[in-house]
Amino acid sequence: MATTWDAGEKSAMVSIGTHALFLSASGPGRKPGAPVVLLMPGSGSTVDEWVGVRRLVTPFARWVEYDRPGLGRSESPVARPDAISAVSAAGELDVFLKKAGVAPPYLIVCHSCGGLSAREFLHLRPNDVVGMVFVDANTEKSFDGGNWPLPYISNVMGDLDWNEGTGLTANQKLAKEEWEVVLKMQQDPQHHLTEAAESQGYKASQTVLAAKKQFEKQALGDRAISVIRGNAPRDLQRMYDAGVAAGNGTEEDRRLFREYLESADEKDHLWQEEILRLSSFGRLVRSTSGHNVQMVEPELVAEEIRWFTTNFFFFLSPTMCFYDRYIFACGDIEWACFRQFCPKNTLLRHVCGKKMEMEPPVSRPTLCRICLELKKKTERIGELKSHIRRMKREGSQDDEADPRNDFLIATDLQRIEDLREDLVLLQEHATTSKVISRFNAVDEIDKLEDAHDAINDERVQFQKFAKTLALVLEE
């Protein structure tokens, strides 16, 4: 059933009892069953940081955004808590959406600490979230489970301006007046109090979320997710350099900060990659910006949203096979080719993805060749069977065995050997790739090898039978 927020451009203050929150909706009217893009910004962030993304998304998708209590245009509760947790933020959003009448399904777009709240919302409304786009989102393991900002990092950064120090001011793509609104919101005293309360509740939020074991349970099932990894370690490196130049922090603070930076990039990659475990179907995209991807690369965020919304109804199709899912996750190969040449519910599902930092476990030519060979080998078996049956029927009339039979068998066996070389290469790539932990590629490759071993065994039997038959016919 359509609601007042399903069409047209509108914004309003919506009361949730003790205070009212700002809500805005824009973009094309929702089609029946179509998801709405629901924005969940990071700690201390407002919807004003997302103007560039919204501008790119609203031509093709329904967009809904809101400011949390004490941020942006939203009111603060009369009794402001000292610590705001991800659980409380998700619970408040749940009540807010019901009060406003913004109906599911939801495609959640979350950033930074908003990743924790988004996953708590998923816990509350598991059947209403049909997909998620994580924009350099935090997890229960971010900062090694420590409370952000870590004390020694704060000491070295001192009073330095984050926007200037990280290059955000120079690289953000908002219009001048839009950027001024962002800065104005960041300087609001109420904003600072809310941001401090959210930081105070951060560590406890990680602990509570970790206990839910969403990664182990694959909380999103097979619903699509996209993980956009920014370069937060680069931002921290820039702030470290600026802080040291300004003389901030003790030698111990600087040493601890340096030690953190030494492993920051590797850890951040693992944290971001682990988010993919929420679903059996997702992809990892690497941005070229720092942590605030939404302001520096809004087009990248919009593209990941488009990837989901464009294919949403196809994702739900019961006829969608694993190869189709592979192609959409990869986004780099003509899926129609696979639908034409590959049997459904077979092998090589989810082997690699587009724009991953790691080398894909198999190249496009190799993958296509393997898939096409599967089809060719299957057809060749049928040809050999038909040929041998024909030889049986006509054997008494033949003066000699058909020499083409041996030629066909020899040629086919050589192709099998070529294919097995491809399989070895594929397995080597897969077993050395981090993708293996996400998609269980080894199991799939084992199945593929078993299938080809069976084909090879059957062909060997055909060869023996054909030679025996040829000898009989010669007699």
Image: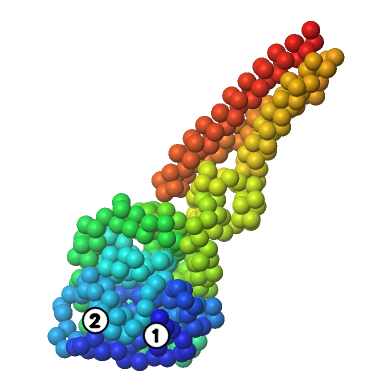
Q: Residue at x 54, y 81 (%)?
A: 59
Who's the residue at 50% across and 60% down the image?
317
On screen, residue 191 above or below 298: below
The amino acid sitting under disc 2 is Thr
Give the numbered dot on residue 194. Answer: 2
Q: CA distance from mark 1 to mark 2?
A: 31 Å
| Disc assigned to residue 3 | 1
Q: Position of residue 282 (x, y in %)?
A: 45, 58
How busy is the neighbourhood of tag 1: few (under 14 within 10 Å), some, or many (20 plus)?
few
Picture quarter with the C terminus: top right
Residue type, label 1: Thr
Q: Residue at x 35, y 69 (%)?
A: 128
**Which residue occupies the extreme right position in the image?**
399
Determine the residue located farthest toward the top in the rendered image.
475
Question: Relative to residue 344, is residue 204 drawn left or right?
Answer: left
Q: For this view, does 257 lie left or right of residue 354?
A: left
Q: Nearer the viewer, residue 373 or 116?
A: 373
The answer to whether marks 1 and 2 mark residues whose Cβ atoms lie closer than 8 Å is no
Q: Of helix, strand and loop, which one carries label 1?
A: loop
Question: Which circle's residue, 1 or 2, is located before the other in the chain?
Answer: 1
Whole-percent x, y for residue 256 in the image: 26, 58
- Counting from the top left corner in percent of width and height, residue 152 is at 24, 65
* 240 over 354 or under it: above or below: below
Which of the pair 265/346 is nearer the observer?
346
Q: Say left or right for 356 vs 75.
A: right
Report helix, strand or loop for mark 2. Answer: helix
Name the spot of residue 402 as percent of width and height, x first. 81, 20
Height in image: 465 above or below 442? above
Q: Nearer the viewer, residue 321 or 147?
A: 321
Q: Is residue 154 left or right of residue 340?
A: left
What residue is shown at x 71% (from left), y 19% (from top)? 466
